[in-house]
Amino acid sequence: MNPRAVSGAPARSARVGVGALLVLAVIPIPGRAQTLGMRGWAGTTIQAVEMRPLAQVAGGCVEGEPCYLPAGEQLSLIGTQDVSLTAWGFGVEGLSATLYMRGRAGMGSDFVWPRSADHFDALLGYAQWIRSGWTVRLGRQEIRSGLGFASFDGASAGWRIGTWNVEGYGGRSLARGLRDPAYKALEGIEDFVPDQNVYLFGGSARGRVFGVTSTLRYQREILADRSGLAAERASFDAATTLPRVSLAGGIDWDFGRQQPGKGHLTASSPFGGGQWMASVTARRYVPYFSLSTIWGLFEPVAYHEAMARVGWSATTSLGLWASGGWRLYGDTETTTVLRALEDMGWRGEAGAAWSFSPMWTVDGSYRMEWGPGGYLSSGDGSLRWSPTDRYSLAVTGTAFQQIEQYRLGDGRAYGAGFTFDAGLTSRVTFVGGASVIRHSVEGDGVESPWNQARGWSTLRIAIGRDAGRANRMRR
Amino acid sequence: MKLLRSPLPAAATGVVLLCFGVGVASALAPRQEAPFPHEDHAGLFPVCAGCHQGVENGDVEAMYPAPSQCAGCHDGSDLRRVTWAGPSDRVSNVRFAHGDHALELSAAGDPVTSCVSCHADASVGRMAVTDATQLETCWGCHAHQRDDHFADTPAAECASCHVPLAESRFPIERIAALSAPADHDDPDFLASSHGVAVAGDGEGGTRGVDAAARCATCHTSDRCVACHVDPGLTEIGAIPAAPVDMDQPEWASAYPTPASHETISFQATHAPEGSSGTAECATCHTSNDCLSCHVEPAPGPVETLLSRSESRAPGVHLEVTPPETHASAFFLSSHSNLAAADPGTCAACHTDTYCAQCHDGPADGGYHPTSFVSQHAADAWGRSSECASCHSTAAFCRECHQESGLVSQGRLEAGYHDAEPLWLLRHGGAARQSLESCASCHQQNDCVQCHGVLGAYRISPHTADFDAEAAWAQSPRTCIACHTSNPLGGGG
């Protein structure tokens, strides 16, 4: 954890939060105000995780070489407060305002959980106006697309005519997965980040032709002084539903690296009277890195994967599913010593869920990941008791074996725990759980690196109109 | 009793019509008292119109003699007193006007010559009026071709003989006892065919209001608006509403699902084209139904629908249920495909904050299984999902790995990658396969230590077909990170 990154974050984020609140404050509310509507929720989460960080010791695993071994247990205790609000009825038809804010803090932890020292984030904060086919947003927003997630402080405008939509947006780019400009958010924890703002511009066209819905998008990120690009990409995504099969596919193009990025094509079809659902997917994956980092210049290769999935559900009380995938990595054009590097991997998963009575549900799954860089064999199961629609309690169990990325180690880990979900009122839910994992070490391997205990609970309160829906729609 | 003095043939015609009218009305309406003994008075009343003057002039009040006229003779002295207080309250939905009917018959070449033509058997005399005779007389022309009385084609002209139910003054028992024509048994009758018939596209070629008159024979518009959310349809307006004092059975509102709604693509394509396209929706749906999914501020067409509080009918009462796509066990991992292709569909039900609950969510065990922290290494290497969708590699992954003791600091040393002898000589391939995993522990400077022009080994990380000019043109400062100056200008 870099102290510089942490110390400046609360003040910066607080300014953004205040700015978002100002967006709400300046919205006019005339005397003949419409009925003010509001919908939202507040959630308080407490999480405790017991970790066993590794420490480098000399000559521990391989003779003459330093080795990483687990040190003592450390407890991480984190509190998170989320508030999400959408309000409308400000006297201007179609005008609404949305805020999603988060506060977080470590609570006397030995182990600093990621980002827990960044005490405030305004995840979203924008005013939106929808009218006559137009959608206009102003403030902190997020674009989710075939290019991934892009957050920015700025404006966007979309126009719908018939089944067509066009959209344009632009503003100050925020670091991926964070809510600050990269030069601030990554200062001190990442080398070679831009020393200035990055501006993001993009546009999309979406339409429906011959039953196919498709979106074409272009997005460009440029340094404030125009001295270079941070990203320039485009994507095309499409989906359609035919009488017996649904198709969804997409691909993006990285102008910076002058090559295609990710891509996928999935065909899904029900059969057997609707009891079965099968899908096959062809997929290409290659990591995306900003042009402002050196990672992309190392020319990561893509892997191509073929996947098949099948699910069966004769009734609402019983369901089975299985999936499998095989992937092949591209030629890395690197010299290997001693032996060749693995270039293919497999993964598979199967599971079942059975509600054998109105109150009891048992489910279990097994998954396997086998390829270069890691191996995992893992099984999970749970037995859930739901005496009413509002309360449930489940006991869970897990067992897994994994070999991490190019590391030695053997043994099996076993875990058990419980989760609960209580709808205290129509507006208040309380969910949580706890689990314990114990690592059974075989041979002379490292000593119990994965022994840990963890627990979490969330109290969630729905606010405003249609609180019941908000509760039903919770994840 | 005064006798009607009017010249023939008009008088004769009037008498005929009078007799017919009284007879039909008597036959079709339940009588509460014994029939009037016409034959006993045959010598007293020379013409029918003497007592039934209203038949001739259309005066409903004068259809029957006033009780005082009877009491003129039946005063209890010479003749016994009669208690008749006037005709009973007749309840009928038969549409009949003597004058109009006579004209229609005349126009058809079958003029009515006397009351006896319809109200009595001609062979037994003018005053031999019986109910049976009257009914047979009507049915001689008007009998339906089916035993159950109803004509089952949409073109049936019920209204030619019947007044609308709203004008019938039927009691609730009689309304409830009305039988339904056979076309009402059609499984699609409620969902579609009754609307098609009323709209005039059905068999028989009836159009709109004319067809609605058939409905009005047995229904008031109250029956329509018990289900129809939008009462403004022309066809509904053509069906009279019940008078305020008419008791009617209570109907259960029913909203069968139209076939169009059963298609797989309906949910994705149901948006009407413009506000005028909601006319069909308004038959069954209130705006509350739309708002059970659509978030505020709602799409424009929603605002054209009545709200539940404004509608007399309850509407369908939709509840939030996920579309079929969401039922797949694989939806969680595959929904990004659909969201990227058609984000507008997602936005119909979900706000940005809903997505952010997972994608920017707190660590509350919602997305990943509870043991995920222990097991995520293999997932992260294989990237079945893109970790960076939610997590910053530098600020999340590396931060935790650093706290966990996994991150190298300072000069790179062997040790962590202990499963691979000579790791430094072999790491290139692994790095190109999963560079994101490398970046989850290593900073860029770790690589520059060896790969930079000032590094220990100056090993180029580029492949043979690397386009250096393009890279320089796009982001020269990134090149300088390793090369310290323009590599194309001889600096590196």
Image (tube, coloured by chain):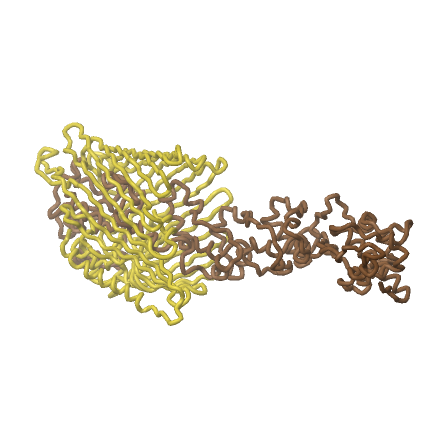
Count of marks, rendered view = 0
Which residue occupies 21% across, 59% down? A183
> Camera-side residue: B479 or B322?
B322
Image location of residue A275, percent across then percent down: 46, 36
Instruction: Please indicate whether residue A419 sits to the left or right of residue B190 in the image.
Output: left
User: Is residue B329 toward the left or the right of residue B172 in the image?
Assistant: left
> Toward the viewer: B185 or A378?
B185
- Picture quarter containing residue B160? bottom right
Is residue A194 or residue B47 the one in the foreground? B47
Residue A28 horizontal/vertical position (percent) = 35, 70
Residue at the extreme bottom: A31
User: Visible in this render: residue B394?
Assistant: no
In the rendered image, the quadrant that contains the C terminus of chain B is bottom left
Which chain, by letter, is yellow? Answer: A
Q: Residue at x 75, y 63 (%)?
A: B61
Q: Which residue ends up furthest to the top in the rendered image?
A: A443
Which percent across, then down, holds residue A373? Answer: 24, 38
Query: Horizontally, is B280 left or right of B437 in the view?
Result: right
Tell me the quadrant of the picture where the N terminus of chain B can be found: bottom right
Q: Position of residue A109 (x, y in %)?
A: 15, 47
Seen at 36% across and 36% down, the residue is A324
Image side of residue A221 versus residue B123, left or right = left
Residue B205 appears in the figure: yes
Question: Which residue: 23% across, 32% down?
Answer: A414
Using the image as rendered, state which of residue A441 and residue A461 is in the foreground. A461
- Which quadrant holds residue A444? top left
Which chain is tinted brown? Answer: B
